[in-house]
Amino acid sequence: MINEAQSRIQSENVAFVCKAIEDYEIEKNKFDIILSSMMLHYVKDLNVVFENVFNGLKTGGQFIFSMEHPVCTAYQNKWIDTNEGKVWPIAHYSQEGIRYYDWFVSGVQKYHRKISSVVNSLIKTGFNIKSIEEPEPTNDIIDKMPELVGHIERPSVLIIKAVK
Ligand SMILES: C[S@@+](CC[C@H](N)C(=O)[O-])C[C@H]1O[C@@H](n2cnc3c(N)ncnc32)[C@H](O)[C@@H]1O
């Protein structure tokens, strides 16, 4: 993936690092913005990562990230067929921790945590939370891609913007 990214983006302003975020110390007070897309639900200790990101931002810098929505990570099985159609159970929500699921391969490991834990961890780190989004596909998109209809029934992605 790094090779592919490097072949697409060649700029002296861009550096590629292949490391787990837990092992990468972000240079302090350097960045105006730090983005993370659909990665943080694989991280065991969010506090460590949030602190690392906080230190890497300049004052006023923004941290914008998406992660799998806790409503989705709580229950590690699948949709249930009911008389009212397919239902996504929000079971085991309060039991934070490891989950296993199938994503191209079986037994992929991820971590479930409550929304309040994510938000409180940001606040504890010192971030000001600016917005929280739970996007869903529009009707236009559902017309073109009906397989995405489940994402209207329950949120699949949580997006947060926080500022140092
Ligand atoms: C669902 S993919 C998202 C990929 C891409 N960011 C996107 O939004 O299309 C999750 C990515 O998180 C990476 N990842 C998982 N655990 C990680 C960790 N501890 N540190 C850094 N990256 C991690 C995986 O290698 C994978 O590329």
Image (tube, rainbow, N blue to C red):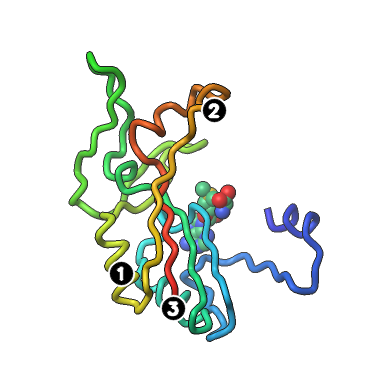
Q: Earlier in the sequence, mark 1 or mark 3?
A: 1
Kind of residue at disc 3: Lys
Mark 2–mark 3 contact, CB under 8 Å?
Answer: no
On the picture, is 90 further left or further right than 50?
left
Q: Nearer the viewer, residue 108 or 158?
A: 158
Location of residue 57 with respect to 146 vertically, above or below: below
Left or right, 87 with respect to 127, comes to left
141 with respect to 106 (left or right):
right
Residue 79 in the image: state x and y as whole percent. 32, 27
Residue sitting at 25 percent across and 59 percent down? 116
Residue 32 in which image quadrant:
bottom right
Q: Secondary structure at mark 3?
A: loop
Q: Which residue is mark 1?
A: 121
Residue at mark 3: 164
Q: CA distance from mark 1 to mark 3?
A: 14 Å
Image x and y of residue 114, in percent: 26, 54
Badge 2 element: helix
Instruction: Please identify the quarter of the rendering in which residue 154 is found.
Output: top left
Q: Give the residue displayed 38% in from the left and 50% down from the top.
A: 110
Residue that numbered label 2 is attached to: 140
Say above or below: 140 vs 51.
above
Asked if the residue under mark 1 is in contact with the one under mark 2, i.e. CB atoms within 8 Å, the reply is no
- Image disc number at residue 47: none
| First in residue order: circle 2 vs circle 3 | 2
Q: Residues within 10 Å of mark 3 (few under 14, many from 20)?
A: many
CA gap, disc 2 to disc 1? 36 Å
